[in-house]
Amino acid sequence: MERGGRRRRPRRSRSQLKGSKALESSYFTAEVYLVLGCLTASLLVLPIVLPALPPPPSSLLFVPIGILVLLLVLAFMPSDARDIPSSHL
């Protein structure tokens, strides 16, 4: 017995600590595995069951390209730091 009446815990090796930590705090629960399994099954089965869709109009194919160009322009557009209000000054 140590001072204060507390008992000393037995020492564990690193592998025992890692194993117990993994069991205590698993990242995914059983419900998450069930949802992921159903999603995987639907992605495998639905393309076989459903009929093929016609291709989209060609004008819609330019929408992602337009978004990409807009984001590139905004990313490389120079900004004047004096016009940006700052609360820490």
Image (tube, rainbow, N blue to C red):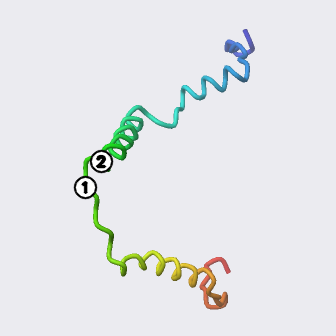
* Rendered view: 11 above or below 43: above
Tell me where residue 84 appears, x and y as whole percent: 61, 86
Q: Residue at x 68, y 15 (%)?
A: 9
Quadrant for the N terminus, please: top right
Q: Which residue is mark 2?
A: 46
* Residue 57, image quadrant: bottom left
Mark 1, Cα crowd under 10 Å, few <14 / some 14-19 / many 20+, is few
* Rendered view: 89 above or below 27: below
Mark 2, Cα crowd under 10 Å, few <14 / some 14-19 / many 20+, is few
Front tag of 2 and 1: 1
Q: Which residue is mark 1?
A: 51
SS at circle 1 = loop
Q: Residue at x 65, y 90 (%)?
A: 80
- Give left or right: position of 2 versus 46: right
Tell me where residue 73 appears, x and y as whole percent: 57, 84
* Rendered view: 43 above or below 15: below
* Residue 75, image quadrant: bottom right
CA distance for labels 2 and 1: 9 Å
- CB atoms of marks 2 and 1 within 8 Å: no
Q: Residue at x 73, y 19 (%)?
A: 13
Q: Residue at x 38, y 37 (%)?
A: 37
* Three-letter code, disc 2: Leu
Quadrant for the C terminus, please: bottom right
Closer-to-camera residue (23/47): 47
Q: Earlier in the sequence, mark 2 or mark 1?
A: 2
SS at circle 2 = helix
Tell me where residue 3 appears, x and y as whole percent: 74, 15
